């Protein structure tokens, strides 16, 4: 004796077909929605990654135009200090006024680092050596002393340090 399925009530075929069609439609919609969300997430990851990379590799414009790193020797591993111009100055009466961004950032970097050398921050003495201004990968200026007996050109010194000469 075999078991047989009970007879289906009339209209069951249409109802079952409808339920299967609804399930298939929901499944298809869910997959499309998931694909759109995945594509949107991937797009956002690319945009955020590119923005993060740009932010990480380039210093803010204020830092690029108003500051420099001064090194105690012709090596990026040597002792250094960051110097910069303020954005504004406070007068004796407490009022503030903006400080103009220097037109010649190379001259400004040399002046700032010369002050650090003269103050004895980068050496034991106060004698200011000849200074070479290079550009770091984040577009901030880096100023290095150059020994007068060093036969390399300024450009060669910067290149040897993995930097570019500021022109």
Image: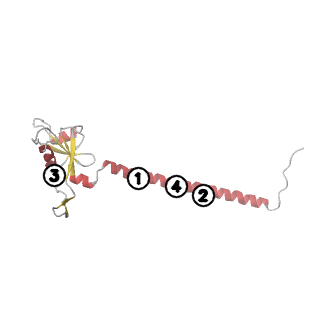
The mark lying in front, picked from 1 and 3, is 3
The numbered mark, 4 or 2, whose residue comes first in the sequence reads 2
Dot 3: few (<14), some (14–19), or many (≥20) neighbours within 10 Å?
some
Distance, label 1 to label 4, CA atoms, is 16 Å
Residue shown at 52% from the left, 56% from the top: 36
Q: Position of residue 39 (x, y in %)?
A: 50, 53
Dot 4: few (<14), some (14–19), or many (≥20) neighbours within 10 Å?
few
Residue 159, image quadrant:
top left
Which residue is labeled 3 in the image? Answer: 108
Distance, label 1 to label 2, CA atoms, is 28 Å
Quick check: marks 4 and 3 in contact, CB under 8 Å?
no
Residue shown at 14% from the left, 51% from the top: 107
The numbered mark, 1 or 4, whose residue comes first in the sequence reads 4
Q: Position of residue 103 (x, y in %)?
A: 17, 57
Q: Element type at marker 3?
A: helix
Distance, label 1 to label 3, CA atoms, is 34 Å
The numbered mark, 1 or 3, whose residue comes first in the sequence reads 1
Which residue is labeled 2 in the image? Answer: 29
- Give the label on residue 129, or none: none
The numbered mark, 2 or 3, whose residue comes first in the sequence reads 2
- Give the label on residue 37, or none: 4
| Closest to the observer, 66 or 32 | 66
- Give the label on residue 48, or none: 1
The mark lying in front, picked from 1 and 2, is 1
The mark lying in front, picked from 2 and 3, is 3
């Amino acid at each position: 004796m075999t078991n047989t399925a009970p007879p289906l009530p009339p209209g069951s075929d249409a109802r079952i077909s409808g339920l299967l069609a609804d399930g298939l439609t929901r499944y298809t919609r869910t997959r499309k929605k998931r694909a759109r969300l995945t594509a949107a997430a991937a797009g956002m990851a690319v945009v955020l990654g590119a923005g993060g990379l740009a932010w990480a590799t380039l210093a803010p414009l204020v830092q690029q135009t108003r500051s420099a790193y001064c090194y105690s020797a012709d090596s990026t591993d040597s002792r250094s200090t960051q110097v910069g111009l303020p954005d504004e100055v406070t007068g004796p009466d407490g009022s503030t006024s903006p400080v103009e961004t220097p037109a010649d950032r190379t001259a400004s970097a040399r002046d700032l680092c010369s002050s650090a050398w003269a103050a004895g921050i980068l050496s034991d003495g106060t004698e200011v050596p000849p200074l070479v201004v290079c550009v770091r990968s984040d577009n901030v200026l880096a100023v290095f002393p150059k020994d007068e007996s060093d036969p390399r050109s300024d450009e060669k010194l910067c290149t040897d340090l993995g930097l570019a000469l500021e022109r």
